[in-house]
Amino acid sequence: MFSFLISVFGVGIPTKRSYVYKLSPTDRCKSIPFRIDSSVDGDKDSCLRGWRGRTRFNPSGISTHIREYRHKPPASLLEGRGLESGAHVDIMGNLALIYVVLRVAAGARGAEIGGDKLYSDIFRMSERINLRL
C-alpha cells in the first residue's frame, strides 16, 4: 500500500484559465460581489501547506511531495506535444514524470524519488495564505 502522495505541476507556462475571485471594488454590481481577477498565473491550488503534516485536509498525516516540471515546448512539429511539456494534460507525456510514475509503481517511496522538486517560489507564496489548517 502506498504511504505518500505526490502532486505534480507544470511551471513556466501561462495557464489557459488563470484566475482567482476577489471582491468587486465598485457599487455597480451589488448583486454580484465577486469578480474574476485574471492577472494571476494559475488557479492557486496546491497541496503544499494544507496537506503537510496532520491537518484537516490530511487527517492521516500521510507524507506529501510536490514535483514541478518546467515546461519546455517541443523543438519541432514532429515532436508532437513535447517530451518535456508542463502544459495541463500534455504533462502526462513528460518523460521525467513518466519515470517517477514508473518508479512509484515499482515500489519506490517519496524520498527514493527525490522528494520535493520545485522551481517556483511556491513555499514563499504559501506563507502568505492565512488559512486555518
Image (cartoon, grey):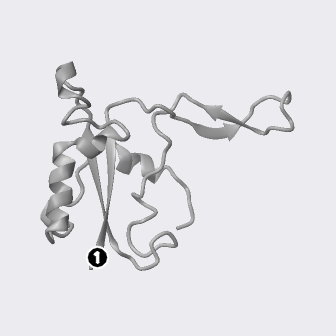
* Residue located 20% across and 36% down the image: 84
Tell me: residue 122, above or below residue 23.
below
| Nearer-the-camera pick, 26 or 13 | 13
Tell me: residue 29, above or below residue 124.
above
Is residue 35 found left or right of 41 in the rendered image? Answer: right
For residue 95, what is the image quadrant?
A: top left
| Nearer-the-camera pick, 70 or 126 | 70
* Residue located 38% across and 39% down the image: 88
* Residue located 49% across and 49% down the image: 128
Tell me: residue 2, above or below residue 118.
below
* Residue located 31% across and 32% down the image: 12
| Position of residue 65 measured from the top left corner of the image (x, y, whole percent) | 29, 61
Residue under label 1, please give it.
3
- Specify the quadrant that holds the N terminus: bottom left
| Position of residue 36 measured from the top left corner of the image (x, y, whole percent) | 64, 33
- Circle count: 1
- Dot 1 falls on a residue whose secondary structure is loop
Tell me: residue 101, above or below residue 87.
below
| Nearer-the-camera pick, 44 or 125 | 44
| Position of residue 81 measured from the top left corner of the image (x, y, whole percent) | 26, 31
Q: Looking at the image, can residue 114 be seen?
A: no
For residue 101, what is the image quadrant?
A: bottom left
